[in-house]
Image (cartoon, grey):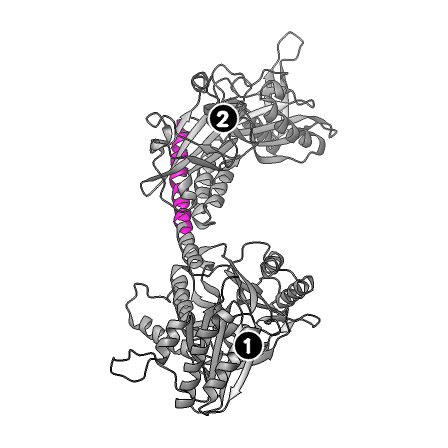
Amino acid sequence: MKVRLDVLPLGGGLGAQCLVLAVPEAVATDREQDQALVRALSGQTAIGLVLHDPDLRIVRSNQFPGVVGPPVDAEVGPPGAAIDEVLVPQDAAAVEEQLRRVAQTGVPVIGQVLQARYRKAPEQERVISLSALRLEDGDGRCTGVAVLFSDVTERHQERRRQALVNGAEKLLLGSLDIVATAEGLAGVLVPEYADLAAIDLAEATLVGGEPDDFSLGAPLQRVAAAGAWPAELLPVGALVRVRDPEREPIYRRSAVALSDLSELRAELAYDTEGRRQVLPDAATSLLMMPLRARGRLLGAAMLWRCGARARFDRDDAELGTQIGARAGISLDNARRYTRERRTAEILQRSLLPQADAQVSAADAAGTYVPAGTATGIGGTWFDVIPLSSCRVAFVVGDAVGHGVEAAAAMGRLRTAVQTLSDMDLPPEELLTHLDDLVTRLSQAEQAAPFPSAGPRPGSVLGSTCVYAVYDPITGLCTIASAGHPPPVLSAPGQPTCLAQTKPGPPLGVGGLPFESVEQAMTPGTLLAFYTDTLLAHREEGTEERLRQLRDQVQAATREDGTPARTGHAVLRHLLPQAPENEVTLLIARLRTLPAGSTATWEFPATPEAAGRARDAVTIQLTAWQLDELAFTTELLVSELVTNSIRYAGGPVGLRLIRDQALICEVSDPSQTQPRLRRALVTDEGGRGLFLVAQLSQRWGSRYTRHGKTIWAEQPLPAR
């Protein structure tokens, strides 16, 4: 075995001249390396070394004033000093907690990143990476804690800056709701960058408009705030006005940091409103960050730091400028999206009828619920169309696509249905004509140039529609559907079910012809027409949603509530939040005309039929106390019955209906529609329909299964 001999001379006259130490060479080498390591750690200052006794007081340190963070006049800590005598109390508590755990458990701490600000320089940020291990004697008893640390303040600040910038960039991929974007920005800034943050935006931007000129008094609205909000600051929702545009920092293109607020406090000492806008009591520094995008000033972000936190400086202002630039783009994207959504919604609502409709046949209420996003606003619509002879048509449809284009497509479809319904066509024939129209329009759309290579955002092709006609005299409801779900039917005393329909294909698709189903309705029956988006839900299936809809409609039938109240109850239950796609719901409560409101006769095609018809009408009007209308009604009946006998043959049907107007109907077996024409002075005939048009308020004709019916309305005399 190799040994190392160390010969040490001895003095003092003790008789021995030297001391010989023999140590195994390997042990001596290890000892030298240990001593070299201790000397290297103790002699350098790049890596801090601090030895603590069992009470965590400082025993030894290789740090000196001005090294590893502290200013020249700060002391790292003399021997015997406690940690809280060196660091600010908050940081000292966190460091001491780590070291005490090491001393008690013996489990070392490696690379723990902690705040370590000096008591003599609390405003200067200082972050260290700390490693600690327990020191033990030969018996395993704790003799102290050794701490190695390095200053990582710059690295930590750079990571924080990058995280803040990345957080602002992620807003570009987040919500397109402008308020949610502002709240997200405030959440990014607090607590990483500031203790308090407020986002103030121009009022016009909240509704998608262009920001107004703040120098002319246009207000800002505080739309978001983060942090423990003090009572002395304006809350969310408050209005903020720029009072001195020439000095206002938000007009600059870069952020402005005020590290000393004493001058601002003196300036606003007697300005309560100004202090409430920008000066919380606990603030030590302020950063004003303009929010700009595409050359527009959208608003500003106000940031405050409080207490012992490092104050905002020039570096923070540069970082704030970067964050503000990215956040401004996010907010402007949200503003433009809001404008598109509002435009689509305004157009959609402008094309819809009034929500409530009261006619003789029914009370109806339609509800349109816009989607929470612009992509969910499409082309759903409802309509309640009064028809001749007190009948009424109920319509609910859904155009394909989303946005303004879909709303425009919906407007074309609704106009077409209104026009076709004026022809008094049966539901299946109306849908057939509408299907032909959609086919022509879709062919024209495909032939027209379009800037986008993708699918059109709004098209009539593939739209769905349900059309129902209810007659309050017969109590019959005829329903036809073009790819649309059937309405929910709830009759008094009967279980709620789906109305009988024979679903046809969507409009313009082609395939099977449209068919209608006729169903008898009892007075008080409730019909609920809806779009399929009402039944769409991520968690609940369509069947479950349909069951809930039936239950809500049945409950409304028992309560005998108004259609508007019923619709609100259904939507409140099925749509507690804004839907992903727009929803349309039409509730109609059916009723019949009172007994004795109609009178019906049938006459053979004989010359005396016109006179008999006049006599019958006169007697009936006297019974209804409508003698004032006897003369004009006799003329109408005489002309219409005479024309039917002359051109169509018999039998000829005559019906009077007393409702909000007096309606006179004449039916014959001919399918030839009458045509109003201008008779010449020399013509002996051709003036009958002209007289009908002049004597009546409205008139028209419709096809029936056995021929046609010509009708004319007269207003009732005022009582």
Circle 2 is placed at which residue position?
276
Horizontally, residue 695 falls left or right of residue 127, namely left
Residue 317 inside the magenta-drawn segment: yes
Q: Position of residue 184 (x, y in %)?
A: 49, 42
The outermost residue toward the top is 13
Tell me the SS state at disc 1.
helix
- How many numbered tags mark residues here? 2
Residue 296 inside the magenta-drawn segment: no
Q: Position of residue 96 (x, y in %)?
A: 64, 27
Q: Position of residue 577 (x, y in %)?
A: 57, 54
Is residue 14 depicted above or below 688 in this figure? Answer: above
Q: CA distance from mark 2 to mark 1?
A: 79 Å
Q: Nearer the viewer, residue 166 or 698?
A: 698
Q: Are marks 2 and 1 in contact (CB under 8 Å)?
A: no
Packing grade of label 2 (10 A; few <14, some 14-19, many >=20) is some
- Characterize the magenta stretch by its predominant secondary structure: helix
Badge number at residue 620: 1
Q: Quadrant of the N terminus?
A: top right
Q: Position of residue 631 (x, y in %)?
A: 45, 74
The answer to whether one can see residue 250 in this image is yes
Q: Residue at x 71, y 34 (%)?
A: 105
Q: Residue at x 41, y 81 (%)?
A: 639
Mark 2 and mark 1 lie on one chain; the one further toward the N terminus is 2
| Amino acid at circle 2 | Arg
Is residue 512 depicted above or below 90 in this figure? Answer: below
Q: Residue at x 56, y 76 (%)?
A: 598
- Segment colored magenta: 314-338
| Amino acid at circle 1 | Gln
The answer to whether one can see residue 483 in this image is no
